[in-house]
Image: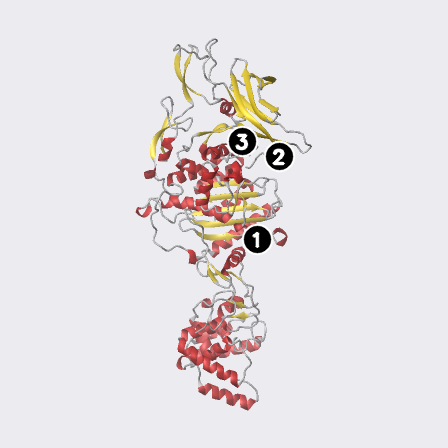
Amino acid sequence: MAPLFKAPCSTVLLDADGALLGATVANDGQWRFPANNSVPARFATCIIQFEDRHFHGHFGIRPQSLVRAWRQNHKAGRVVSGGSTITMQVARMARGNRPRTYGEKLIEALLALRIELRMNKAEILELFAAHAPFGGNVVGLDAAAWRYYRRPADRLSWSESATLAVLPNAPSAIYPGKGHTALRAKRDRLLDRLLQVQAIDSTEWSLAKEEPLPDRAQDLPQRAPHLLSTLIAQGHGGTLLRSTLQSTLQDRSTAAAERYALRLNANEVHNAAALIMDVPTGEVLAYVGNLGNAGGAHAGAVDIIRARRSTGSVLKPFLYADMLQSGELMPDMMLADVPTRYNDFAPRNYDEQYSGAVPASEALSRSLNVPMVRALRTHGIERTLRLLRAMGLQSIDRSAEDYGLSLIVGGAESTLWELAGAYANMGRILGHYGRLGMHYRADDVRPPHVLQESSSTAKPEPLQGPPVLSAPAVYFTLNALREVVRPADEEGWSQFAGQKRIAWKTGTSYGHRDAWAIGLSGRYCVAVWTGNASGEGRPGLTGTLAAAPLLFDLFGLLPPSSSPEPPYDGMVRTPVCRASGFRAGRDCPEQDTAWIPPEALRTPVCPYHVRVLLDPLGTHRTSGGQGISTVWFSLPPAMEHYYALRHPNYRPLPPWLPGMGGTDEPMEILYPEAGATLLIPVQLDGTKGNMVVEMAHRDPRATLFWDLDGTFIGTTTGSHRMALSPPPGPHRLTLTDGQGHALHRHFTVVTGASTATAHAP
């Protein structure tokens, strides 16, 4: 039997407990909710007593009722009674409520008999409740319950159920807002009937009659409008959608975002989005797609959660974790933070300063661009892209050549949906590690889901093959993101995060167009984006200032959750140099025994503690086996130059005794790299641009003599930088200090149209 009803339905979005989050009108302009295969007992009793008291005793038609109706109509000279059973009314509605004629009545009767043969009484009643008219453009019991009483049909009182039960009888003549007196009279007669058949007692009858009638149809809730629009665009229109959202948390999250909007609007920032996820299940608990007060002028209807935006620095944790599990990093290994340039790309730290040398974990927590770009170059862009995509960042879909080294500092675009999912994947890998007799599960890395139908109910299966990220790598990454070594303006929030044990990362795109903050507690992942949908940047629009406060407001709505235990059975203990963070060498004076990922055993031992010979006064180095042997912490020249500025206790190596020069190199060229091919741009006025050569010397007072291709070109003292404009072709640069130390660098120059630098916080 073909479906009786083909009318379009509204799209209805429910929360995890069945509460209404929002709905749209059907394509034909009617509020018609999809059938939910359930009719509340109160309404069933009311509709049967009002429309068809013999519903359970006939086979679709009741000849006695039809004969009585014919007599009444004949006597009155007009139609005053139809005599239709509920089944015949279903048949009438299925045929489009055609004009009432005796021929049409016969067809309805035959169709009713057919319906009774194919369906049971409960199914017939469900069809009636789902498709009966309830006045105005309201069709079906569920839509009527929400439109008139703003709650589901199974929570209606006897009075409310009776009110709705009398509406299909004459939906165009009486309904809330029209025919109030007649509607009350009909409801009261039905309540009298319910008392008579003992469906209700006298107390319920008395209280029901005192209940007021609704005076008009109510607006339906719109508690997750952006999610509803997105689901419709994804092909879910006209269906009943049971989501994973928690309505109370959704409302409180929306309210928190709207309160925070006042602060954003003061800086002419008009859009924000937030997502809260349950990490173990991957379920989305709250979905704030945009600010409700953004309005049409500021793209308030756009679902920012699904929009591609520049990622800023929020990809750095994945690079750090991948390098840990690849054996390229120790968690606190010192990385170089010095002026760096790769051809036309020059990353800069947000504060425009350099630390010289910084622990890798601190480079991550402080979101230093230079060390992370240098790390990306070492690790490889293609490898990093594979990891990002494996973690669920499918919007990062261009080639490694297109992204270049800017990938890690905002050169890529992704969505809040994907980024929250990727961070939750990290939390899930660590949280599930070692549970249920398996180290890694096959479904640990998966996208977020917001519909209950997409929830995985299958028994967890062990992962076949290596994990995308190992649990130890994730552990050290999240541990670094919990550290309080942050910029000064983050100190207050770091204290809050420490109390909640939140691992969090901020990001800001180039031009202050996008501000991100993503955090993980033991069970929850919260992700926030703020900015302008138009792409307009604003001063002060940073992840720290514009997104982190809302992140912590949202974490404040969540119950505490414990952090996962360290994955000790996936780690090893080894001596670590306290000063450098490298594996301890035999000359490292202060060592700690620390847990590390096993792959980190492949990293080199500390290269910065060297054994030297000093004269008896300890003021000069000696050679030839003469002198006092001691261990010295010594960084390469460029790292030392900037490190010493921030660490007054750092002591450079003593100079050599006169006549006892050693083989160590006191200077280092920062740019260009050995063998580099350099693109020197042509300026807008047609003239050739410059390349800036930069180097560092251990002695801050040293004077350097510059020679290019055998021609002396100048000297520098203190700050050693020089702008050059060599012609295309190969070149040889020679730098010599006053002690006779010389350094050579070969490079090739080509001309081009333009250059760029990167400064992505």
Whether the residues at callouts 1 and 3 have beta carbons within 8 Å, the answer is: no
The answer, for residue 537, to whether it is visible in the render is yes
Residue at 60 percent across and 34 percent down: it is 755
- The kind of secondary structure element at disc 1 is loop
Sequence-earlier tag: 3 or 2: 3
Q: Which mark is residue 302?
A: 1
User: Residue under circle 3?
Assistant: 342
- The number of numbered badges drawn on the structure is 3
Sequence-earlier tag: 1 or 3: 1
In this view of the protein, which residue sits in the foreground, 475 or 201?
Answer: 475
Q: Is residue 172 above or below residue 333?
A: below
Q: Residue extending furthest right?
A: 685
Q: Position of residue 747 (x, y in %)?
A: 54, 25
User: Residue under circle 2?
Assistant: 754
Q: Nearer the viewer, mark 1 or mark 2?
A: 2
The answer, for residue 317, to whether it is visible in the render is no
On-image quarter of the C terminus: top right
Query: What separation in Å lies between label 1 and label 2 (alpha carbons)?
Result: 35 Å
Residue 203 placement: quadrant? bottom left
Crowding at dot 2, Cα within 10 Å, few <14 / some 14-19 / many 20+, comes out as few
Q: Residue extending furthest left?
A: 437
Residue at 33 percent across and 34 percent down: it is 572
In this view of the protein, which residue sits in the foreground, 232 or 524?
Answer: 232
Crowding at dot 1, Cα within 10 Å, few <14 / some 14-19 / many 20+, comes out as many
